[in-house]
Amino acid sequence: MSKPQSIQESRPAESEVLYAVDGNIATITLNRPERLNTISRPMLAQLGQLLLQADNDPAVRVVILTATGRAFCAGLDVGSAASGTGIGSQNDADGARTTLDLKTAPPTILFNMEKPTICALNGAAAGYGMDTALGCDIRIMAESAKFAAAFVKRGIVPESGGTWFLPRMLGWAKAAEIIFTGRTLSAKESLEMGLTNHVVPDGELMPRARELASEIAANAPLAVQSAKRMMRVGLSENFNDHVHHVFLQLLPLMRTQDFREGLASFLEKRPADFKGH
């Protein structure tokens, strides 16, 4: 693993999404705390751009997604929508489109990212915020955090992946109950249902997220990314096709310097120093 670099800030503090790289870990932070990090159009654009930036940076091995303030993301900015200025308002020109370009939409980018993603939920994740958290590979929740599947209570559906993620994570019946009722789940309930990996005291959220990210980043990055790629394509493959595709991923990995370093470090009983090539 390469030596940690100093933290790099790529956007001013007033941005609605912040970006920092520390060593091999990129942290993307929703930064609209006065509005509970509700989604605005600039926030969507910045989030998509920064997810792509992290995924395309060879130095980044893991991405942490979190937020400032007491909420992770309270969903769509309902106030702006109701006043006619935000996403989903009557004056929203994009709302009249009958086709959508999802290539640059954060949920699609998040799903297709090669880098592992960890969502550190500092507070409530409702609507779009819940879908975004479910789109990450791993979730860690502060004890005060919660999931609110309030879509049907607002007259909409889980528009950013919830109807795809929840049945696969929980099974049809449990997913149906949560989505159809618009239920709110505490961190403890989310852990019991398998929606989150860990629940920690509020003050330990980011240290625990960084600890887990560092553990992942210490491994061979090409192998981690290949494993994620195979997990993703395996969602729509039968077993025989999947094994064949895994083998095709394995062959080039066995020609990398990291593979040789992995063998050498094991035989020499020392920590591996993976370079990502």
Image: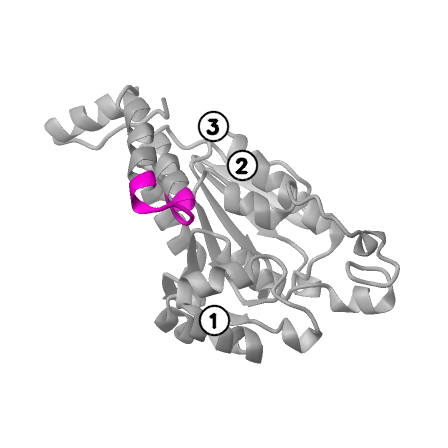
Q: Which residue is mark 3?
A: 58
- Image quadrant in which you'd find residue 257: top left
Q: Amino acid at mark 1?
A: Ala
| Residue at (47, 64) in percent of width and height | 166
**Up-down: is 204 above or below 45?**
below
- Residue type at numbered disc 3: Pro
Screen quadrant of the N terminus:
top left
Q: Position of residue 25 (x, y in %)?
A: 45, 40
**Residue 238 covered by magenta stretch:** yes
Does residue 264 lie above or below 135 as drawn? above
Secondary structure found at label 3: loop
2 or 1: tag closer to the N-terminus: 2
Q: Is residue 207 left or right of residue 77?
A: left
Q: Amino acid at mark 2?
A: Ala
Classed neighbour count for the residue bearing mark 2: other residues with Cα under 10 Å, few (<14), some (14–19), many (≥20): many
Q: Earlier in the sequence, mark 3 or mark 1?
A: 3
- Does the magenta run of residues contain 249? no
Residue 14, position as x, y percentages in the image? 71, 48
Residue 55: give x, y in percent of width and height. Answer: 52, 35
Q: How many angstroms separate mark 3 from mark 2 (CA)?
A: 8 Å
Q: Secondary structure at mark 1?
A: helix
By secondary structure, the bulk of the magenta-drawn segment is best described as helix
Magenta region, residue range: 231-241
**Residue 143 visible, this angle:** no
* Mark pair 2, 1: CA separation: 31 Å
Residue in the picture at 37% in, 29% down: 3
Count residues near mark 3 (Cα–Cα under 10 Å), then give few for <14, some for 14-19, many for 20+. few
Q: Which residue is mark 2?
A: 54
Q: Is any part of residue 34 visible from this angle?
A: yes
- Mark drawn on residue 175: 1
Circle number at residue 237:
none
Instruction: Indicate the colouring scheme.
Output: one colour
